[in-house]
Image (spheres, rainbow, N blue to C red):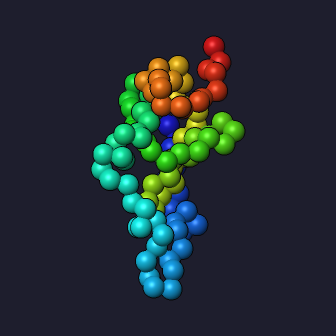
Amino acid sequence: MRSILPIKSEDFLPRLSSSGSSRRSQTQATPQERTKNLIVLVFRDGHRMEIQNYAIVGQTLWVFEERVATKILLSDLDLDATQRENRGSGLRLPSQEK
């Protein structure tokens, strides 16, 4: 399955100020805040992935990490199970075609 493709790009990173520090470091979340906002993806083959920063563009879910963006096709996810797993989180996925 080749639908999960890591992409390394400096375009996803915050720019450094002249002092050498990034704005992101000033607003770092605590460990409790990071785990509180996790979304669990449930794949059709049963495995799971915890994510935090993501965007859905068309039929693709992009997961953004510190230095890597990962592309996941929505068709590789069990959308109903993912929606159930994240009830109350505000996650909105398109309906799964049957």
In depth, the one of 65 and 23 nearer the eye is 23
Residue drawn at the location 44% of the way across and 36% of the way down: 39
**Residue at the extreme right of the image, as rendered:** 58
| x, y percent for residue 66 | 43, 60
Q: Is residue 21 above or below residue 91?
A: below
Q: Answer with the quarter of the image where residue 85 lies.
A: top left
Residue 55 left/right relative to 47 = right
Q: Position of residue 84 (x, y in %)?
A: 47, 20
Q: Which quadrant of the rendered structure holds the C terminus?
A: top right
Q: Nearer the viewer, residue 44 or 23?
A: 23
Residue lying farthest to the bottom in this orientation: 18
- Could you tell whether 30 is left or right of 86 in the image? left
Q: Identify which residue is drawn at 50% across, 52% down.
A: 64
In the figure, is residue 8 to the left or right of 29?
A: right
Q: Is residue 96 above or below residue 66?
A: above
Q: Could one spot residue 20 in this view of the protein?
A: yes
Residue 45 in sight here: no
Residue at 53% across, 31% down? 90
* Residue 40 % position (x, y): 42, 33
Q: Position of residue 65 (x, y in %)?
A: 45, 54
Q: Quadrant of residue 12?
A: bottom right
Closer-to-camera residue (60/83): 83
Q: Is residue 32 left or right of residue 26?
A: left
